[in-house]
Amino acid sequence: MMPSRRNRLAEEPMTDAPIGVLCLDTSFEKIPGHIRNPATFDFPVVYRVVEGATPQRLVREADPTLLEPFVAAARDLEADGVAGITGACGFLVLFQAELAAAVSVPLWSSSLLQLDLAHRMVGRPVGLLVADEAALTPRHLAAIGAEHVPVRVTGMAGQPEFTEVMLEGRRDALDADRLEREVLDRVDRLAGAHPELGALVIECTDLVPFAHAVQARLGLPVFDIVTLTTMLHATLTRRPYPGA
């Protein structure tokens, strides 16, 4: 019988608690800052790619038949001994409840889980940078009880580099400089149209390598899947304070 999560956390060294990541089926280059680049983190990360889970099926089609293979992948990660699980696509938020219920370790599927937190922290509308603005629906926010959060949304679907490499998978080689320019253009337009923004949440994991440039541009708190994954790991690796 597998030990309970409580017992396992008591028995295992906290500094070695690995985080599992549910991944889409993509082959493009994952640069530092991307959740699927191990150099992004200073703790162990275990990846599980869900075969056939393309951006088209998850982001644009919200294909409900993907739930079962994602549940299976989450259970595989748990069986491999991860201490918690996150996801490599913000649109996984539609499956948050089912995925979390399928495993006994903490599972935070999407950077969108930080929307309510960001809004409560700043008390102002929250910018949301997504892969495809047209694909984001009220269902995605309702899945995590964030439908009340005032969001101002912009998307990357019309940007050539992002569309060719990330959304449509026409090539694997990434022009990072070109993609950064596309990201900053969308952010500039969003901030120009909505100067009342108090924070920004990056839905798309592929854009996190440019979070520092986004923050430099906006001067606001920026949340993404890396901030969420780092927080998850921190909650599972508490240590005694010196002198306590």
Image (cartoon, rainbow, N blue to C red):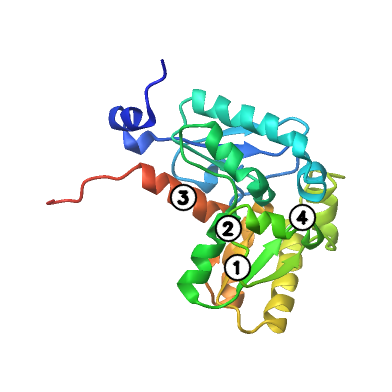
Q: Compute the Cα span from label 3 to label 4.
A: 27 Å
Q: Is residue 110 left or right of residue 158?
A: left
x%, y% of residue 45? 51, 37
Callout 2 amino acid: Gly
Taking the spot 67% from the left edge, 47% from the top edge, the residue there is: 94
Q: Label 1, on which residue? A: 148
Residue 28, picture quadrant: top right
Up-down relation of residue 17 to residue 134 (above or below): above
Closer to the camera in the image, 84 or 211: 84
Q: Nearer the viewer, mark 3 or mark 4?
A: 3
Callout 1 amino acid: His
Q: Label 3, on which residue? A: 230
Up-down relation of residue 148 to residue 6 (above or below): below
> Dot 4, crowdedness within 10 Å: few (<14), some or many (≥20)?
few
Q: Label 2, on which residue? A: 145
Q: Label 4, on which residue? A: 175
Q: Compute the Cα span from label 2 to label 1.
A: 8 Å
Q: Is residue 47 left or right of residue 2?
A: right
User: Reading the chain from its start, which is encountered first: label 4 or label 1?
Assistant: 1
> Dot 1, crowdedness within 10 Å: few (<14), some or many (≥20)?
few
Callout 3 amino acid: Thr
Q: Nearer the viewer, mark 2 or mark 3?
A: 2
> Dot 2, crowdedness within 10 Å: few (<14), some or many (≥20)?
few
